[in-house]
Amino acid sequence: MLFVYYPKCSTCRKAKKWLEEKNIDFEGRDIIEDNPTYEELKEWYEKSGLSLNRFFNTSGMKYRELNLKDKRPEMSEDEQLKLLATDGMLVKRPVIVKDDLVLTGFKVKEWEENLL
């Protein structure tokens, strides 16, 4: 299982602690040092069944700086995925990728239902 996170993010730290407490094996990946590629994001998005919005860190400074709230509705899915691949700070984190499961953000109930 892949756990993509930002080490300075308090939510990511809580999620990592939760995984460790539940003895769930994972491979950690720092989203700043190793941002997901366009190909990975496209695959994750397609297999997740989630809206593309769930992949964006809509509360992040970078998202606001780029005025993406107004720009994204005019962008194609492909353009949005390419944009996500340019900067890990735009990606909603943490991201869990396991077999056919992709989770974005840390919601305990959702993680319990899918990972335990």
Image: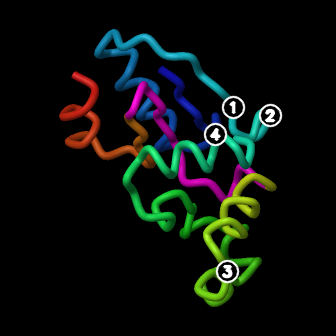
Mark 1 vs mark 4: which is more N-terminal? 4
Q: Are marks 2 and 1 in contact (CB under 8 Å)?
A: yes
Residue 32's image quarter? Answer: top right
**Lower position in the chain sequence, tag 3 or tag 2:** 2
Q: How is the image coloured?
A: rainbow
Can residue 81 be found in the magenta stretch? no
Q: Residue at x 28, y 36 (%)?
A: 111
Q: As displayed, is residue 99 above or below residue 62?
A: above
Label 3: element kind: loop
Q: Nearer the viewer, residue 7 or 38?
A: 38
Return the x and y of residue 42 as percentages of the image width and height: 61, 50
Residue 30: give its label.
1
Which residue lies under the disc numbered 2?
33
Amino acid beneath label 1 = Asp
Q: Of 102 and 22, which appears nearest the observer?
A: 102
Residue positioned 42% across, 64% down in the render: 51
Q: Is residue 89 magenta?
A: yes
- Dot label at residue 101: none
Quadrant, the C terminus: top left
Report x, y in % for residue 69.
Answer: 60, 83
Structural crowding at the residue carrying mark 1, measured as other residues with C-alpha within 10 Å and reported as few (<14), some (14–19) or many (≥20): some
Residue 13 at x, y = what percent?
A: 50, 33
**Residue 72 appears in which quarter of the rendering?**
bottom right
Instruction: State which region is magenta.
Output: 87-100
Q: Amino acid at mark 4?
A: Tyr
| Residue identified by numbered label 3 | 75
